[in-house]
Amino acid sequence: MSRYELIYIIDTALEDTARKELIERVNNLIVANGGEIEKVDETWGKRRLAYAINYKTEGWYVLVTFKAPAELPRELERNLRNYDSVIRYMNVKIEEKRSSVKPRTARPVAAAEEVVEKAEEVAVEANDTDAE
């Protein structure tokens, strides 16, 4: 199973109880189709939209992190399209970082100091030739 993030914006005209029911319906949809909800974050709350969507300027943001089979995001988006109170949604697959590259070894400090000294010598020589 892959990890996904779903963020959706709910119309602020919806009452608190109806909004909570919608959030619960989306969560139940994820679980019913074989997904595991890791986190539901409603702390973003009511925010002003960057631009008006269907003449609405504010929305209630909800972020859901979950694990699911590959077929679930398509089904989830199909259902979110049918909810009139969902203004926008976006579902993103979270890529796990896998690093097979060895970390770089630190350069010795003495080598870095030599580079600085060399650069200073070149700068001094350039000033001398300009003065002549």
Image (tube, rainbow, N blue to C red):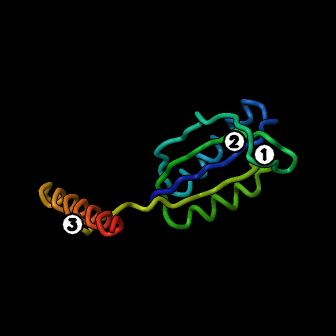
Taking the image as shown, residue 28 lies to the left or right of residue 85, namely left
Secondary structure beneath dot 1 equals: loop
Helix, strand or loop status at disc 3: loop
For disc 1, the neighbor class at 10 Å (few under 14, some 14 to 19, many from 20) is some
Q: Are marks 2 and 1 in contact (CB under 8 Å)?
A: yes
Q: Nearer the viewer, mark 3 or mark 2?
A: 3
Q: Would you name the residue on which mark 1 appears?
A: 85
Name the residue rendered at 55%, 46% in the picture: 64
Label drawn at residue 132? none
Look at label 3 and name its amino acid: Lys
Above or below, 3 against 51 in this view is below
Q: In this view, which residue lies farthest toward the top?
A: 16
Which circle's residue, 3 or 2, is located before the other in the chain?
2
Q: Quadrant of the N terminus?
A: bottom left
Label 2 or label 1, whichever lies nearer to me, is 1
Q: Which mark is residue 102?
A: 3
Q: Residues within 10 Å of mark 2 (few under 14, many from 20)?
A: some
Q: Quadrant of the C terminus?
A: bottom left
Q: Is residue 22 above or below residue 123?
A: above
Residue 89 percent across, percent down from the top left: 67, 53
Among the two numbered marks 1 and 3 on one chain, the one whose residue lies closer to the N terminus: 1
**What residue is disc 2 on?**
22
Task: Tell me where residue 100 sits by quadrant.
Answer: bottom left
Cα–Cα gap, marks 3 and 2: 47 Å
Q: Quadrant of residue 72?
A: bottom right
**Upstream in sequence: badge 2 or badge 1:** 2
What is the secondary structure assignment of the residue under circle 2? helix
28 above or below 113? above
